[in-house]
Image: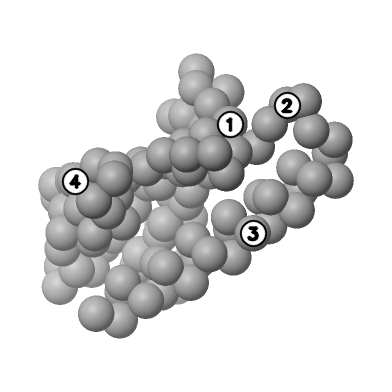
Amino acid sequence: PEKQRDIVAAVADEMLTWSSEETAIAFAVVGSNKVVGSVRSANASLSVHDLCLKLGGEHGSGGGKKGKGAYSYSLGGFLIDPDDDDDINQQTWNAIKTKEVARIFRMLRE
């Protein structure tokens, strides 16, 4: 739900405390039709602001400062619909997650 979107940032904050992690990215589908992501980094060579702008893309938004940032974009009609059964929604989430992870790694390599 939209009212719980702050959980995404809390997860990214927690991930950054793991012993060997210097950059953390957490994302979720919020409000059934929007990907919301949170980026945290202790790596001074990574521009979190620029990464979040890229991840937001031309149809979303993103930005940040001092090692913290966020991005979001609409899924359009490819949403997690509460009227669909759990299996369909799980398959939809798996497709979104696979695509988003690939997109994140691609943008980190650029």
In which quadrant will I find the N terminus? top right
Q: Are marks 2 and 1 in contact (CB under 8 Å)?
A: yes
Crowding around mark 4 (Cα neighbors within 10 Å: few <14, some 14 to 19, many 20+) is many
Secondary structure of the residue carrying numbered label 3: helix
Which residue has dot 1 on it? 32
**Which class describes the residues within 10 Å of circle 1: few (<14), some (14-19), or many (20+)?**
some
Using residue 93 as the reference point, say whether residue 64 is left or right of it: left
Say which amino acid is labelled 1: Ser
Q: Earlier in the sequence, mark 3 or mark 4?
A: 4
Q: CA distance from mark 3 to mark 4?
A: 25 Å
* Identity, as a three-letter code, of the amino acid under mark 2: Pro
Which residue is label 4 attached to?
A: 63
Which residue has dot 3 on it?
95
Q: Residue furthest front?
A: 77
Contact, mark 1 vs mark 4 (Cβ under 8 Å): no
Q: CA distance from mark 3 to mark 1?
A: 14 Å
Q: Secondary structure at mark 4?
A: strand
Name which quarter of the figure residue 108 lies in.
Answer: bottom left
Q: Reading the chain from its start, which is encountered first: label 2 or label 1?
A: 1
Relative to 15, residue 37 above or below: above
Please name the residue shown 54% across and 26% down the image. 31
What label does residue 82 carry, if any?
2
- Foreground residue among 17 and 86: 86
Q: Secondary structure at mark 1?
A: loop
Label 4 is placed on what type of residue?
A: Gly
Q: List x then y, in percent, for residue 51.
A: 23, 61
Give the CA separation, mark 2 to mark 1: 8 Å
Q: CA distance from mark 2 to mark 4?
A: 30 Å
